[in-house]
Image (cartoon, rainbow, N blue to C red):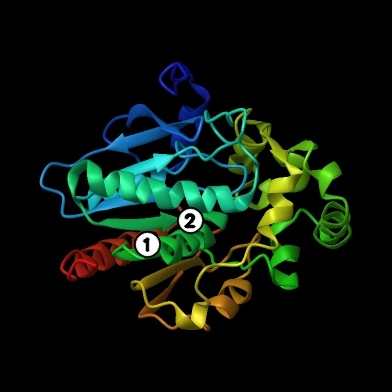
Amino acid sequence: MPATDSYAARSYWRRYLAFLPDVMRLPRAPDEEWWQWHGTDVHLDRLDVEDAALKVLVLHGGGANGRLLSAFGALVHGAGQSYVAPDLPGFGLTKPGPDYDHEYSSWVALATDLIEHEQARDGLPVVIFGGSVGGMLAYHAAAASGTVRGVIATTLADPRDADARDALARNKVWSRLGFAVVNALPALGDRLHIAARLISKLEFITNDPVFSRVFIDDPLVGGARINLGFYRSLTVYEPPVAPQDFQVCPLLLVHPAEDRWTPVAVSQAFFDRLGCDKDLVMLEGCGHLPYEEPGVSQLRIAVEDFLERVSVLPRS
């Protein structure tokens, strides 16, 4: 029996809208549905556009959910394309099924299967748009799938790298000692769940402390209880294709220039290794979640231009 919870029945997510510019607000709330994946009911936000040339799969990172990234969905919708955004297991409204293993590789497998599901649904080519850790997930899913038209990422922090782990974790105690402990004692770490506000730097999700507090106090964001095994597996995941060999599709990195959570240098280190057609656009004045001017206008233009360019590429 599919889950029955919905964002329509909740109001907290609407608090974010007061901080977002018009270009990052959808004309209406997304349609909601549930997709059954290996015993887990996955919540999907969806907004279809008639005569769209593409569908964009929007992927969140740790401590977020698909409804939060309706801000990116609005950019996609404004470009005349359809979008779908899952709540990945353990986040938002998606509760892991009884056999779910809390491994990061399962996120990659889910995203890969969702790409196939969406391609079969209406035949539209798929582009992946990942925010925060979802940017690296977008790369991993594209590498595993081999069939997407393009990847857009706001950050590309490779958690196998010590500097990237330092950036992603709340502090160096977590990134060095904490990860060392859960890697040495995986059976212990895999049973522990910790609130996202205690393990991640949600105070830096925006550069406005008042806006960031909305994330921290959100029961589905700062209050989400994250399995430590997920973070352990994130730091050791080996992608199926090394970045220098990645040729699946073009990649656009739209990096916030004033990101206090994931410094540009951390993403640049991975971006520079990529062997595909790639572009980097710096979003001026933007923090980790880019919504400020002039960067949000730069983001809108970059996304629209990229989607138009990849829409005419030959099918894989």
If the image is split into quadrants, where does the C terminus sit? bottom left
- SS for dot 1: helix
Seen in the picture, residue 198 relative to 138 is either above or below; the reply is above
Q: How many marks?
A: 2
Residue 222's label in the rendered image is: none
Residue placed most toward the observer, 18 or 146: 146
What residue lies at 19% left-to-right and 44% top-to-bottom?
A: 122
- Point out residue 50 in the picture as x, y percentages from the top left corner: 12, 41
| Lower position in the chain sequence, tag 1 or tag 2 | 2
- Point out residue 126 in the picture as x, y percentages from the top left corner: 29, 55
* Residue 146 left/right relative to 134: left
Residue beneath disc 2: 290
* Residue 59 left/right relative to 165: left
If the image is split into quadrants, where does the N terminus sit? top left
Residue placed most toward the observer, 293 or 102: 102
What residue lies at 67% left-to-right and 46% top-to-bottom?
A: 202
- SS for dot 2: loop
Residue type at mark 2?
Answer: Pro
Residue beneath disc 1: 299
What residue lies at 33% left-to-right and 72% top-to-bottom?
A: 249
